[in-house]
Image (cartoon, helix red, strand yellow):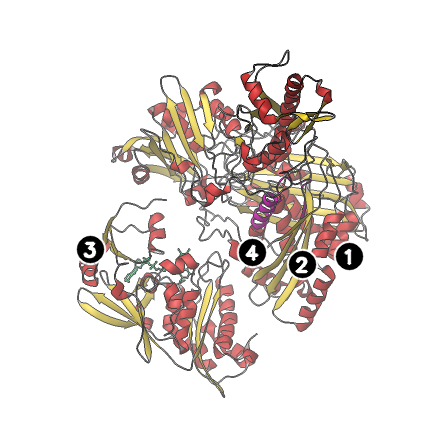
Amino acid sequence: MIPASFDYERASSLDEALSLLAAGGEDARPLAGGHSLLPLMRLRLARPSLLVDIGGLDELRGVHDDGDSVTIGALTTHHEVAGAAALTGGSGLIAKVAGGIGDPQVRHRGTLGGSVAHADPASDLPAALLALDAEVTLAGPGGTRSVAAADFFIGPFMSAADDGEIVTGVRVPKQEGWGSAYQKFQRRAQDWAIVGVAAVVNWTDSGIAGAAIGLTNMGGTPLRARAVEAALTGTSEKAQILEAVSKVSELETPPADENASSEYRLHLAQVLIARAVAEAAGCPGMQR
Amino acid sequence: MATAEKYVGGGVPRKEDPKLITGQGQFLEGLTLPGMLHAALVRSPHGSARINSVDVSAAAAAEGVVAAYSGADLADEWAAGLPMAWPVTDDIRIPDHWPVAQDVARYVGDAVAVVVATSRNAALDAAELVEVDYDVLEAVVDVEAAVADGAPRVHESFDDNKSYTWALTNGEVDEAFAKADVVVKERYTQPRLIPNAMEPRAVVAQPVPSTGDFTVWSTTQIPHVAKVLFALTLGIPESQIRVIAPSDVGGGFGSKLNVYAEEALCIALARRLGKPVKWVAGRSEGYLATIHGRDQVQEIEIAATSDGDILGYRVHILAAMGAYLQLVAPGVPLLGAFLYCGCYGGEAYHFECTGVFTNTTPTDAYRGAGRPEATYAIERAIDSLAREVGVDPAEIRRRNFLPAGDMVQSPGGLAFDSADYEPALDRALELLDYDGFRGDQAERREGGGSRQIGVGFSSYVEICGLAPSQVLASLKYAAGGWDAATVRMLPTGKAEVVTGSSPHGQGHVTSWSQIAADALGIPYEDVTVLHGDTHVAPHGMNTYGSRSLAVAGVAVHNACDRVVDKARGLAAHLLEVAPEDLEYEAGTFSVKGVPDRTKSMPELAFAAWTAHSLPEDSEPGLEASCVYDPPNFTFPFGTHVAVVEVDTETGAVDLVRYIAVDDCGPVINPVIVDGQVHGGVAQGIAAALYEEATYAEDGTLETSSMVNYLVPSAAEFPSFETDRTVTPSTSNPMGVKGIGEAGTIGSAPAVINAIVDALSHLGVTDVPMPASPERVWRAIQAANGGEA
Ligand SMILES: Cc1cc2nc3c(=O)[nH]c(=O)nc-3n(C[C@H](O)[C@H](O)[C@H](O)COP(=O)(O)OP(=O)(O)OC[C@H]3O[C@@H](n4cnc5c(N)ncnc54)[C@H](O)[C@@H]3O)c2cc1C
């Protein structure tokens, strides 16, 4: 299909992008990698009047090591994130997740900021950001601000970013010493997750000292499985983990679609959390 | 033929590929003509709805718009409705099928109006402005629901939703079942599939208003057949229509074996507006407006002895036709009707099929057409029989194979040429290392882990190269089984092959070049193959049903022989000897015993062109034609093996190995044959594991794009292992059989049988297609006594 007609401007600075968006009104949209927006426009499900191409804003690109945390610019591609050396410890989760998005073409065009701003509950990165307690940074006509990932995703394709605001990046705590894993369950290699489980685990001699679990496609937003996290803490054996993962049923009923019923999603989440935790703990005895 | 074969059998690279790989393919979307207009269709969003009114005024007034019409506005354009060429029974119900619906829209996607504009964008934008007032009616999308009492009727003029019932009985069926020790009865669903040619459909119709001539470019598999049918639908003399299937058509798989509303419509609009009119489908639009395949419910019963020797078969199927009857849709189940006994024996056979209207996109022939369905049913059911009588699945096949031989009578009623089924099974088992596999499987089962492995077999036989024409008449198929070729030597010693086949990815240019180069003794590069243009190739029955090599390819071969015959007369004349005194080898005639007195084919081509000295009664030029109508179908066969690993916790299936041993007779080009097998197998596995078009109850196509219609990619497949046995067909002088559909026909049951085998120790006996992880998981739960 061919999109409905629209205007196009390419911004050469963040300020210019913000003022173009402000001038364009509520139907103006930033364009980053285009890998979510353009397919929607081609189906005429999205009809922006103006696209402000932010692809040239090098200031929003790159991964910076800030010591305890890592800052990732919004325009950093999934491919670049997947290879970022600064993402160590628990934050390595972000690299693992980015490396499993779509296919190489998607990973070379799609951006972290686009994934975050799009707020698709089936996208992989949001669950990882949630599990890591990351912060999303925003710039708007009124200046800059940062929002915790837990407050950023507010509904399907809805975020705390206001019209005219641009996501400038995310800040991710490194969580040194923690292990991570992303269990993505999909039908075809390049598909979105039917269920995804992003886990970071602090595994010590006495077992799991801490765990955070982010879930992809288990609700209208990425979710934290907090009851499971609590039940996991202090466990060290497979049987205990299996017991803990059943707590995922305390979440709201997950969605049903052509790939999975709610019941099956819930079942999958339990299997995948157990696998992700075992993998993140790096303890082979706990794996299947 | 006396020539040494140089090219046939060798893996010369495809002539078609360099331009495709380097982006120089010429596809129809790239065709632009002066003054060309663009059509966009307005399609019904309802599964069933009465059209009260269509208001095109806002669209007509939009920028760039030249005209906008409702179905009623166009009613006088049609001399007849869209054609249906396979009325399988005398009392078949054939509904009117107008290119643009006039009173009732019967599926989501049924065209209700068209907008013509100076650009595609303008046409698409304006199409959104057409206002249609509908009374939405109750729709029925499921075949079984459609035949239930009180089902909403797709066509009010018919009493119910049945189009036809066709039956076939051989032998004493009740007797066979009465004396059986064992009867297995299975019910299978064939999901509805959406053909996904790489290139969506497109058409351009160009009028010459002063003469009344039309040139129609279409992404069609059947330019010659379409020309005849365009003439009938539009009331244009056939002599004034030229149809061109561009030299590059990006795949079809049957989806371009049709005469579509948009083709007729572009011609009608070109006639009305006096300008060329183009239409190009979007991918999702194609999902609505291009035929679908399969969508059947099957019941199969096998009667057997306690040793597993099959006595008889009983088959009942419901086949969805969709909302209208497309070109050969009613006949699709008939292509499988003779094959529900597979390559097995037995004394009695009954098949019965009812074609059913539903409020869905019409179905028609999709790669394999009828034969994948039949093969699935028998290859799944024979595994059930194996379980029932406690015989190994490979062994039960061997036990029931028809004897090797030629013209072997099958219980289905056909005589199979070139039957020899055991060697392919043996070879497949050898490649698999069957004993080793069963050992690994036992170990896994003992280990009790969540990754269990299974193996599945499928020994298929299929029918292709539908012929001869008289037999097609007995099946009420309204076209012939022949095809045509002309082979001409050009003055410079090159050759031109004109074929009636219409390749759209199969590699006919390469294969026909190989055949002609060997026969004429000239380099393969020196052969040009012309196709797809009815002004260039006047005769053809075109490309579908794995027929091209076995019919059109043989016509090329025969035409070459005739050229060589004529050349022999000329050589004899020039060398002043009798024709019998000449030997022919690799393009050169030499006088027996005087090997240095020769004439080469290029020399003779030049001499025939100058015509300075010709034999008496001979005409200038070195050219011959052949129209070949084979005496019988060909029956390729083989055994396919799938090995899967199933994650019993999630239900995910990983295809670990896929082995295909096929027999298509002598191979012209092994690279092309492997390519056909790989693609075909991928499509069959896709049906087994991924693809299923689904409709909501109101008729909305839920799987409306590749996001949720799961076409797999290379990442989902292991590297396929292919091998062949070679049993020449006796139906044609080259011994060749089709290979275009075999992969699709053989593969789906092998995969599902493998999944069932992997889970059989848990009590699983069936998993429906496509075996999505959830379905597999549910099958495991159900076998465990849980809820299904
Ligand atoms: C075939 C395919 C497969 C895919 N598979 C996956 C997958 O498996 N997992 C997955 O998570 N994703 C997948 N994606 C989506 C992919 O990750 C996208 O790249 C990503 O979702 C959006 O990033 P983008 O840069 O392309 O954003 P765009 O498409 O350019 O924009 C998306 C939306 O975000 C807005 N936007 C973009 N950048 C900003 C910004 N900096 N500030 C504010 N708003 C902004 C745009 O206005 C638009 O509304 C897939 C995409 C395709 C085409």
Above or below residue B546? Residue B425 is below
Q: Residues within 10 Å of mark 3 (few under 14, many from 20)?
A: few
Image location (x, y in percent) of residue B697: 47, 48
| Proximity of marks 3 and 4: CB atoms separated by less than 8 Å | no
Residue denoted by label 2: B455
Mark 3 and mark 2: span between their CA atoms?
60 Å
| Marked residue nearer the N-terminal end (1 or 2) | 1
Residue at image mark 3: A25
Query: What residue is pinned by disc 4?
Result: B717
The residue most toward the top is: B616
Judged left or right of residue B277, residue B425 is: right
- The residue under label 1 is B391
Q: In the image, what residue type sits under mark 1?
A: Val
Q: Give the chain letter at badge 4.
A: B
Q: Which residues are magenta?
A: B661-684
Residues at marks 1 and 2, common chain? yes
| Residue B643, horizontal then vertical, whole percent | 64, 59
